[in-house]
Image: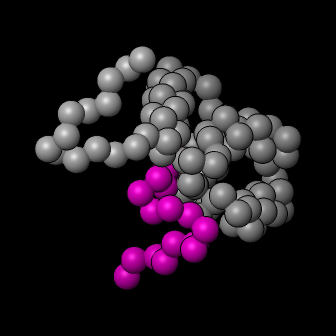
Amino acid sequence: MAKAHKATNQEQFLLRRKLAVGGLTETQWKDFIQELNHHPCIDFAEGKPGGKLIVTFDGTHWSTDALIELIEARGGHLESGWWARRKLAHYRFSDENVRANANLDPFCCSKIPPMKK
């Protein structure tokens, strides 16, 4: 069964992020997940064993960097490794792409695409 999205979020701009988070105790972890689920820009957040954080958020109003700032404000930190840095760079690129596409006026197939000025 599919999970229903929050009414405030636009489904086409939802981004899913999987991050490895360390440095949080069990109670901090539960409080953090609860805080994320009550945030208006976050559609869904859950914690998995081993410090894995899975968050789905509206990319037009929030970003991966905002999520990282929230993690660090709670005293946590992200996993540091080559693959984690590579994945984080891809997440930042797709965040920027979603924000740019949200502001784009769509054009029809029979029209000429808008030209750069």
x%, y% of residue 116? 38, 20
Residue at figure coordinates x 57%, y 43% from the top left: 19
Q: Which residues are magenta?
A: 1-18
Q: Is residue 52 visible in this depiction of the protein?
A: no
Compared with residue 95, is residue 82 higher up or lower down, i.e. above or below? above
Q: Is residue 96 left or right of residue 51?
A: left
Residue 66 sits in quarter: top right
Q: Is residue 79 left or right of residue 24?
A: left
- Of the 4 image quadrants, the one containing the N terminus is bottom left
x%, y% of residue 12? 41, 57
Membership of 3 in magenta stretch: yes
Q: Is residue 55 left or right of residue 101?
A: right
Residue at figure coordinates x 16%, y 45% from the top left: 109
Circle count: 0
Q: Nearer the viewer, residue 23 or 66?
A: 66
The colour scheme of the drawn protein is one colour
Membership of 78 in magenta stretch: no
Residue at figure coordinates x 85%, y 41% from the top left: 73
Residue located farthest toward the bottom when viewing the structure as drawn: 1
Q: Is residue 67 left or right of residue 74?
A: left
Q: Is residue 100 visible in this depiction of the protein?
A: yes
- Of the 4 image quadrants, the one containing the C terminus is top left
Residue at figure coordinates x 49%, y 77% from the top left: 4
Compared with residue 12, is residue 59 higher up or lower down, i.e. above or below? above
